[in-house]
Image (cartoon, rainbow, N blue to C red):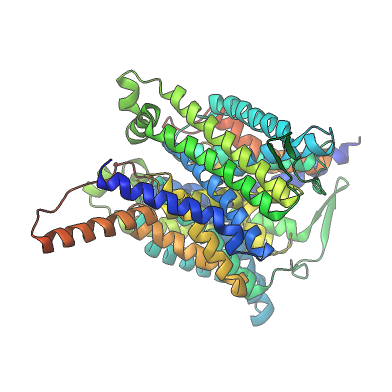
Amino acid sequence: MTFETLLQPLVYGLQLGVTYILLALGLTVIFSIMNVVNLAHGEFYMMGAFAVLYVTGLLKVNYFLALMASVVVVAAIGIFFERVLYRRAQGRVVATVIVGIGLMWMLQTAAQLLFGAQPRGMKEVFQGSVSFLNVNLSDSRIAAGLISMILVVGVYVLIYRTKLGKAMQAVAQDREAAMSLGIDVGKVGTIGFGLGCGLAGVAGGVMAPVFFVEPTMGTTTLIKSLSIIILGGVGSIPGAALGGLILGVVESYGQTFLGYSATTFPFLIILLVLIFKRTGLMGRAA
Amino acid sequence: MNALNCKRAILYTLVFVFLLLIPVLFRNPYHLGVITFMLINALFAASCWFIMTTGQVTLGHAGFAAIGGYLSAALVARYGIGSWWSLLIAMTVTGIVALIIGYITLRIKGIYFIVATLALGEVIRVVFGAWDDPFGGLVGIMNLPPPNRIDIPGLLAIGFASKVSLYYLTLVLVLIGMLVMHRLNRSPMGLVCNGICLEDDLAENVGINIMKYKILAFVIGATFAGMGGVLYTYNLGSIQPSSFTLAQSATYLVYVAVGGGTYILGPILGALVLNTLSEFLRPINELEPIVFALILIGAVLFLNNGLIGLVLMLQRRFRDVTAHIAGRKATAEFPRSQNLNG
């Protein structure tokens, strides 16, 4: 085993991990503000990927513009479903889970009908690759990593440095107290849901040039996002970042050295963390 | 026997006779097969509901079906053990696995338990998919023989090669399973489970060992899911890991949510209604998930307690109206307050 075979998965894993952070941030923001585990999170990721694919393919616009379009489109769809469905189910655990399952089926089937079931690639956006210390990294992965990093920083700034972010934190900490302080809890919820879905969408758009795009790509994505927020501690934003990087690297090494059985990693993470340390790495005690 | 009980007895007898006559009424083997699988799905829904009566919602129920189905298939096909012994062994092992899993995971509550069971169901599926000997990996186990003949000399002899006999076998076992779960739900144990579902902290504080009851309900529900898995494999003649996905577990939960959670009739009704609907939707097969999604979202958001809640409400309204017409005072009879949508 050479140095490169050990380093290559690490680089891949870190890149994947940064994108996973985006996904997990989306899920964790929705959970802390709305107290809803959005089981259709993976479908929003899938829609983001398709949005980028279609906007670049049909309108022939720049990839980065398409990425922005995908955020807007997916966030708008998310806000629509929050208003119409999730809001009515709020506070009832089983109802939110059922709504999530329904939304999952609905969006996945709609995508299959609209876009067809076969996987599609959009490799033509970035074509080169960079080699450093015998470690190869394609331009699409570098772009995905960089864009994700910038967006993660952006979300941090939004949540920790703006008034809106303060309002979100307040709602996440104590809904009633936030309400009594004059924060429009409903509006913050809608914005938070839109932000969460938009993050999932942009993650999909970022990964579209790296992987294939297909209607069923959401399920594994949901599982990965769930395992990250549980590993990091549900509701914790630094936890989501740490969890994302850990999952990315662990999965990357697993796929290199173990193959198929590495697909169980997210599930095992969920089970082990929930059984042995329910608050995760950085979560508060519930 | 008062009038209500008498009415009920007549109704149950009619339903039972109808179930017995189904092979006569539906001569098309395809239809009979569909109805057989409907019964199995109703058993899955009922066993999923039984676990949920303690307030623990599971999204990994297909995992237990997989354990039951796979064990019986492997015992019959690879080790040549008789199908009835395989059924017993498969159910027992599923129960033991559930006991271990339940002991570890039932301390987790609410949405965390849902996510944990989701992960668990998928791990079970992937393990069977990766296990080549004796479970056949991703291909599974094909060409299973039909269940053994029951031969008691001079008394009876039944073979299970035909669809009709498989239907009766499924009917008998499913009814036994449902009856056991129904009786348990109506026993003191069921009442305690109901209490735990409503307020588990309170139940613990008045001295109830809530873990014991949660584990008990979990093991019983899982055992009957294992039985459902065995019946599924016997009817299909084969088994693959792709039959036990997260989508399957979600479907069982949906049966309960659409049917309503107060009585065992709820999940059964949910399974039967949705399965029938899915047969009628066959011409527009590709739209089916969307129709289902709309139904289940509507049921959860707009009905208080699924179809059962709707039926009870209509029944009460009807009774009130007839009482009003007859000039009597309206009867106030409420169902038990257990509501899984809460």
The residue that appears at 28% across and 47% down in the rendered structure is: B4
- Depth check, front residue: B195 or A4: B195
Name, please, the residue furthest toward the right: A1
The C terminus of chain A sits in image quarter: top left
The N terminus of chain A sits in image quarter: top right
Badge count: 0
Name, please, the residue furthest toward the front: B154
User: Residue B215, percent across and down?
Assistant: 50, 27
Name, please, the residue furthest toward the top: B207
Q: In this view, does A151 lie to the left or right of B33?
A: left
Examine the image and state in which quarter residue A151 appears. bottom right
User: Residue B205, percent across and down?
Assistant: 31, 21
The residue that appears at 52% across and 70% down in the rendered structure is: A73
Q: In this view, does B247 lie to the left or right of B218?
A: right
Examine the image and state in which quarter residue B14 appears. bottom left
The residue that appears at 37% across and 53% down in the rendered structure is: B308
The residue that appears at 59% across and 49% down in the rendered structure is: B40
- Work out whether A173 lies above or below A101: above
Report whether residue A73 is seen: yes
- Depth check, front residue: B202 or A260: B202
User: Residue B71, percent across and down?
Assistant: 73, 35
Report whether residue A202 is seen: no
Q: Is residue A187 left or right of residue B156?
A: left
User: Residue B160, percent across and down?
Assistant: 73, 47
